[in-house]
Amino acid sequence: MPSYTVREWETLPYGVGDGYIPSNLAARLVAVAKRSRFAGRGGTGVLEDRRHELRARGVVGVLAAQSCSLEILPKMDVASDEDPEREIASIRKRLVHMLAVALDLKIETGRVTDLDWQRETVLEILIRVFSNKLTEAIRRGVPRRYVDQEDDLPALRGTLDVPRQFTHYAANPGRLACRFDELSEDIALNRIMKAAVGHLARLARNPTSRQRLRELGFVYADIADVPTGDLPWEKVVIDRTNRAWRELFTMAQLFLQNRYQTTSSGSGHGTALLFEMNTLFEEYVGRLVRRALVGTPYHVSLQGGRLFCLTSLNDNRDVFQTKPDILIRSRGQIIQVIDTKWKRISDRIDDPKYGISQGDVYQMMAYAHIYKAPRLTLLYPHHHRLGGAEGVQQQFRITGRKTVIEAASVNVADGNDLVTRLRNTILPAIREEQLVTR
């Protein structure tokens, strides 16, 4: 099955010839994109179907249609001296790392070779990680729980179900209506794992992953089959007895729930594993900031605050709730507000606004008024055209006030010691000697 790769906001031509995707395959991918939850009007939220080309937008991941797939990767400035295949491999690694941090997963990719990163899509990499982790977990034992059972037996087991006994067996005392607990593997968690294994077995293209998923299918042969839409997510309890399965449960949610859609596209079938980069960048940076301030008196809130901008004069009701991405508090006071933006700020030295949009400034002005923070940061991904190092790129003072609004950047393409770099460049208001390096 042919696979194509494109970066967000870049184009993939379709037609006949080398470097082109056939028009019929492009149409299938567009049909799958239109059914995605990120589609927007006319399906342009994921892919724009232009004349003779497809243009990726601000959503990354994998679209798979009948006989083809399209991988959309984030626009990152990785090492420029690498050849195109190695450059794409580096971006895949960074995307998987961002997903691991944002979803609080420990994804070990040591078994994934450099050649695998170059040849396999993000979806194939995640399928391999999941199947390997599930195999290792099963070797330690399949989780079991006591499940309530009802059965009609010749001898009493557990307790007698009196109403059922006198309703059904009043004239046949040889059968007893029993209620009892039985240790069973056919529980909610295992039903979800079986559904994930079956689903991924239909998607995997790597022979090793397909073989492993077939083996896992045999392990779950006696577990009940449940349609994806009826899976008992709310019945899963992760506690000290099965906490080793928490990450597998999170990955199963990734594959089977909101962010992963199974759709129908014309006469064929399509799937989509997609992530909105704005949301992913926000969650990724937020968790790294939280790590940077571990062991300090500073408290980090993600999507906190939730104060309202306005109050209606008609009924005195608060309206227009705010949700800053990151709030940093000290002694109960908010000292910094950080709002992430997955877009590139300007590299033009003659642009006094640095390419910052009017809407972003208005948003920070509202936060300054509501949260009374002395420092507000708009945080963007760093790119090489900025001409300097990551960190604070430009600072502004609100007219007539001491409050500072700044534009800063962080190089997510470089994962080396990113927590420390954030601490030193984006959080300079926090004194270094108070920090405990993690």
Image: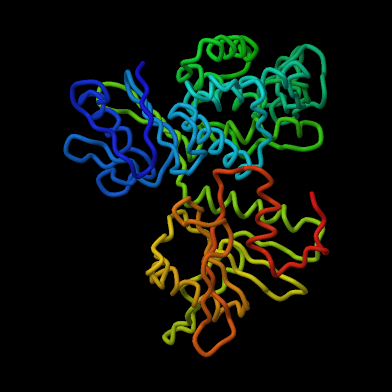
Left or right position of 372 against 349: right
At 41% from the left and 71% from the top, the residue drawn is 353
Q: Position of residue 262 (x, y in %)?
A: 41, 30
Q: How many labels does the image show?
A: 0
Q: Position of residue 246 (x, y in %)?
A: 70, 35
Identify which residue, 229 or 158, lies in the foreground. Answer: 229
Identify which residue, 343 or 167, lies in the foreground. Answer: 343
Name which quarter of the figure residue 125 lies in: top right
Q: Position of residue 52 (x, y in %)?
A: 18, 34
The image shows residue 301, relative to residue 41, as above or below, that is: below
At 48% from the left and 40% from the top, the residue drawn is 258
How is the structure coloured here? rainbow
Left or right position of 240 against 225: right
The image shows residue 406, relative to residue 49, as above or below, that is: below
At 35% from the left and 18% from the top, the residue drawn is 2
The image shows residue 155, relative to residue 56, as above or below, that is: above
The image shows residue 47, relative to residue 283, as above or below, that is: above
Name which quarter of the figure residue 426 lies in: bottom right
Left or right position of 318 against 113: left
Residue sitting at the far bottom:
400
At 54% from the left and 70% from the top, the residue drawn is 406
Identify which residue, 155 or 43, lies in the foreground. Answer: 43
Q: Position of residue 268 (x, y in %)?
A: 29, 21
Quarter holding the N terminus is top left
